[in-house]
Amino acid sequence: MTLRAAHQALPALSPGDGIGNYALRLRQVLRELGLRSEIFAGSLHPSLRGEALPVEELARRVAPEDALLYHYGVASPELNTVLATRAHRVLVYQNPTPPEWFELVSASNAERVRGVIKDLPRVAADFEVAITLSHFSLRALDGLAFARRAVWAPAVEAPVGWRRTPEPQLVLGVGRIVPNKRWELLIRAMAALRRTHPEARCELLGNPEEMGLYADALARLALRLDSGTTLRGKVPDAELERAYRTCTVMAYPSAHEGFGVPLAEAMVRGVPIVASRHTAVAEVAEGAGLLCSDDPLEIAEVLGMVIDDHAVRDALAARSLRRAAAFSPAVLAAAVRDTLAPWGLPG
Amino acid sequence: MIAPMSPPAPDGDLAALDASLLARAQAGVADKKARGIYGPAFVALLEEPLEIRPDPAFAAGPAWPEAVRTAPVSPDAPIVSTRPLIGPILRALKSLVRRSLRWYLAPVTAQVSSHNQAVIDVLAEHSRELIELRREVNRLRREAARQAEDPARGGGGPRPE
């Protein structure tokens, strides 16, 4: 028996969303393997019309011999539709942020994540294969009985003809405005950095949706500490590319990541990285970024070194580019092929 | 079975380079503290917890979103009738009645909405106060437990403030 199709289902497909981008890239990889592949979404952003089918179509379009990948990161009714569909089910575990990180900020987010973690053992029983984006996330599945488990790290590519034109003393933070990212650490580090580098400034690019209370607190802190930090909110892709092109260094102080896509995006663009040592951040940035403690003064000092010392800056940029090879489309394609091979692949 | 893809092994030279850079950074911090660039007041300022106004839903419970959603009262609820044939006539009549009573309904619903919003605001403040008090109790409990424990015992990973 040969696998003919491998489809994906997820609660929502939106532009600029990490899970959505990952699903779109996976669809491309699956099609290049000679498989039919569609995305089925519970809700679809109007700008992505044509990229996904309604999840209600699953029963009609998916055959029992097909593979069906479900991206599991929030509790949502689409899971029940997936479980009602006969197929080789593959759980793509998106390792949600532990609920305690939403304490004070968003009761609804905390509740949704609690639901995912509580239901995981029950849900796992209905899936043959488990996929995670990092080895750190794979360990979260220890003790659950899957026939196969694998890591499919997201693939990233720089735009064609990419060239960096860094501005002096510009620190970049990229990622959702959520408490586990600990952007307050970066703001405090910036306040310290500006004691010796008064021209230093920081741009923080990320979606604050559902996290208004946290974003407000960050904005107040940035002002109170005279940190030179601007919270730019969610920006268009062109603006994000401009930020990667012009920054001196990217800082990533996150305490919990299932992967940390901005790290890989910065690496493939040759951006020097200063990051934390926690969870998947340490794994993804290992060998590329300079991994610091959680002391804002130490972070400030390291940022200062990268800004002042071109040898350090160039070495980190070269390390970023080297490490980015681990997140290439070819590596992702090989991982996908290895995992699906036991079901038989076309050709 | 786990796919044979493993995280990168730290390169010896890289690890040594990183260790030397971090040692340089730590020395730099110590130097700036000694020179007063990072004075005690500034360090204390950096150590202040982030001031987050808590989400009232943590204390107000699962009914909170519905309370917020239904607080504003509108005099313009959709006019519907599914009765065959006479449905459009009924809708037109209802619309006429509504228009004729607008002078009376609009200020009343505005007053009810205003009152509901004031109640929501009061409840939100009470809930936030309750959350702050719970946090303080938990902090004091942790502090008491820490004092009762062996002070040499190490801590875990980072936790939310």
Image (cartoon, coloured by chain):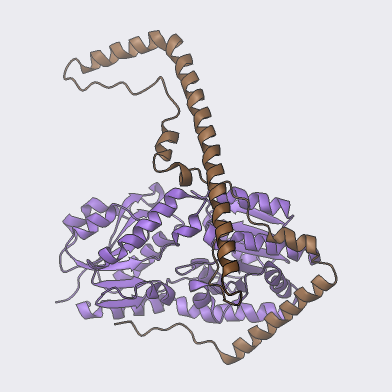
Chain colours: A purple, B brown
B122 or A311: nearer the viewer: B122
Question: Do we see residue A273 in this rendering?
Answer: yes
| Image quadrant containing the N terminus of chain B | bottom left
Residue at horizontal 27 percent and vertical 73 percent from the top = A129
B60 or B151: nearer the viewer: B151
Query: What x and y, as percent, mark residue A285?
Result: 54, 76
**Is B41 left or right of A137, judged from the image as shown?**
right
Residue at horizontal 62 percent and vertical 73 percent from the top = A293
| Image quadrant containing the C terminus of chain B | bottom right
As drawn, the residue found furthest toward the bottom would be B12
Query: What x and y, as percent, mark residue A283?
Result: 49, 77
As drawn, the residue found furthest toward the right would be B35
Relative to A301, is A70 above or below?
above
Residue at horizontal 46 percent and vertical 21 percent from the top = B112
As drawn, the residue found furthest toward the top would be B100
Query: What x and y, as percent, mark residue A320?
Result: 57, 77
**Is B44 left or right of B51, judged from the image as shown?**
right
**Is A80 left or right of A317, judged from the image as shown?**
left
Q: Quadrant of residue B15?
A: bottom right
A313 or B28: nearer the viewer: B28
Q: Quadrant of residue B144?
A: bottom right
Relative to B2, is A267 above or below?
above
Residue at horizontal 67 percent and vertical 64 percent from the top = A171
How many numbered circles are shown?
Answer: 0
Question: Do we see residue A201 in this rendering?
Answer: no
A40 or A128: nearer the viewer: A128
Query: What x and y, as percent, mark residue B113?
Result: 47, 24
